[in-house]
Amino acid sequence: MLADYIVTDNSQKSDYYAGWGRRPSMKRAQKTAQKNKKKALCLEDGFLRSVDFMPGKKNPPLSIITDKKGIYFDASKPSTLEDILNTKEFTQEELGRAQLCIEKIKSYTLSKYNNGLFYSKEALNIPADKECILIIDQCYGDASLKYGQADQSSFDKMMRDAKNNHPNAILLIKTHPDVLAGRAKGYLKKYYKDQNVVVIDKNVNPHCLFTYVSAVYTATSLLGFEALFCGLGVHVYGSPFYAGWGACASEPLIERRTKMRTATEIFHAAYIDYATYYNPYTDEQSDIETTIDLLHDLYLTRYQDDRPYHCAGFKRWKRAHVLPFLTRTSGPITFHDKEETAIKAATEDHGCIVIWASKETDTLTQQSQAKNIPILRMEDGFIRSVGLGSDLIKGASLVLDPYGIYYDPSQLSGLEYILNNRDFSEEELSRATFIKDFILKNRISKYNSDNNALDTSKWPKDKEIILVPGQVDNDASIKRGAVGDVKSNYELIQAVRTAKPDAYIIFKPHPDVVSGNRKGYIPPKHALKFANEIITGVSIQDVMQYVDSVHTMTSLVGFEALLAEKAVHCYGLPFYAGWGLTKDSVSIDRRKRDLNLNQLIVGAILCYPSYLDWENLIPVQAENTLHALSKSIKTKGQSSEAKVSLYKFIRRQSSRLWSNIKYSILSYRL
């Protein structure tokens, strides 16, 4: 957002010294600038800031103000915005652009922070048949009040006038989001119990309230200007940037503001001329139209309800990994060490339970059903990271499933519901083609942790080449999805050799097993009784181009093989089986239609998971995640021989010793 400037820490070469708003950093900038006979630059959030993803935490803004003269909320001195409004002659084209942006903001119901929800009058305890007036409270000591010439007396006068002007109306006191979050206190608490007063203490989208009220009273809140350009009469009791131009129903006289301005003109000056916009996906400056669309897309992926989320049994390191994916709710998010406390809390506040899918117990399921508590089951998405989850690498995608989970065919999952019922659009199918081609071209898989060179010199030219991907023995996808006769890696290799006695079989152990993090190790001498070769540390995409088919229980490698248009034989019931794309040893009646590959991609990659940009803490689309992973693979890479702690080394060797004993006994019995 500061691309128009060269940012440096060299004090002698600086033309400007920048600080934030009216905080100490700005005072230091002004003092240093004066000392060095340079200029000060004031920075501040823009008016279309963000979708507030992390409750209680600040998030990077998508717009910013840079003011060389003052700052818009400080009415004690001129600002660049005030100069624009005093001098500029707006063209019809500019006013038309501003009006289109206003209409889009109204249509998308956007505001500065964009984390509020829509509530009915009944939910807000507002009488259905009464006139309503909106009174906007603000944070005590807020800079916009201090420098906007408003204080407690301003709010007191506001309440008196509202009561006198609207004696029979319901006065809706809207508390500030920071007051709701407990980070600040307001000015109007002493009026909460007055007659005809209703306190709006929920996190409400302002546009919801605009539909319920006939007038708005404010001191300096930006909400007042949002109400103004939405067509409401606004009464102002301070000196915000939009007052003094003749656009408000009542406002103070501000002598420096010499022109009469409409709300549309003020909007263009503030939102288009004054603000700078940023696109975090391209890491470049942007424009207001792109930012409006971006905020709309982000809002649609978040804040779908306001239920409290009670997360049960997440380890402390994992909580930070999953929290950004949980902000589909604007309600509180609480982590509980025990599922009993989560159930109790969800019962009391009518919330829902969030559980890592493989950790769900029969007790949790039964009690939740008995108490009618919804469960959201969490699991990694199919495009995850560069590096292993078992090495505590953060994932770029997660699934939140309200039905079941994709690897458990014993019950309906959210993915299965999508694949059974969705009408796939042409746009989605086109995106699926792009995704498939991008994955193949850039050699992307789930973990992207292997990069050793592949040696195919010994592979025969006259035999079918079969890849058998290993899995983690105790993985939930094996426990739930391996519903046929084959239930382990060892049994799988045997079954493939029996089915294909003349084929050249390549066994690739799971990366988590190779790393020593998970169970499933088969000693090579035992695996090679059925397989012709064992390969490790090699990218699955490198292998895929040379094989004819993949035989698997439930491995995601089977899905990746479908993307590469290879034949896939399933000995269990993975999410991609049963749709007419694979040869299946086990059938499932619930999967009711045949799909083509693009339809499967839309369901599994576009619709089912959520994706996150960890750098900016914002939701992204699958394509953004693919681009980021591709860049990370090229710039960072991953060594298959990563450093191993002493504990992990001992654990790995102990596991392999036990596996040698186990398979030696099994071999002897055979």
Image (cartoon, grey):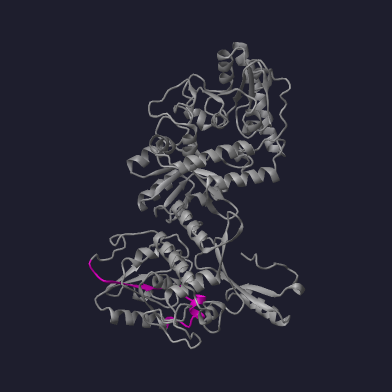
Up-down relation of residue 601 to residue 566 (above or below): below
On the image, which quarter does residue 39 sit in? bottom right
Residue 547 in percent (x, y) is at 62, 24
In which image quadrant can residue 546 be found?
A: top right
Residue 299 position, x and y percent, is 45, 55
Seen in the image, is 98 located left or right of residue 197? right
| Picture mark count | 0
Image quadrant occupied by the C terminus? top right
Q: Position of residue 561 (x, y in %)?
A: 57, 29
Residue farthest bottom in this picture:
255
Q: 129 or 327, which lies in front?
A: 129
Residue 607 to residue 137: above or below: above
Closest to the observer, 648 or 249: 249
Identity of the residue furthest to the right in this view: 12
Tell whether position 137 is magenta. Answer: yes
Q: From the image, which quarter does the N terminus lie in?
A: bottom right
Residue 123: x and y, percent? 30, 60
- Left or right: 36 with respect to 177? right
Which of these two is toward me, 180 or 362? 180
**Residue range (magenta):** 129-152
On whether residue 94 falls in the magenta region, the answer is no
Q: Which residue appears at 62% of the width and 77% of the height?
A: 68
| Visible residue check, residue 10 | yes
183 is higher (above) or lower (below) than 660: below
Q: Left of 503 or right of it: where is 258?
A: left
Image point 58% across, 37% down: which residue? 437
Q: Is residue 213 left or right of residue 129?
A: right
On the question of residue 379 being in view, the answer is no
Q: Residue furthest front?
A: 92
Q: Residue at x 37, y 37 (%)?
A: 366
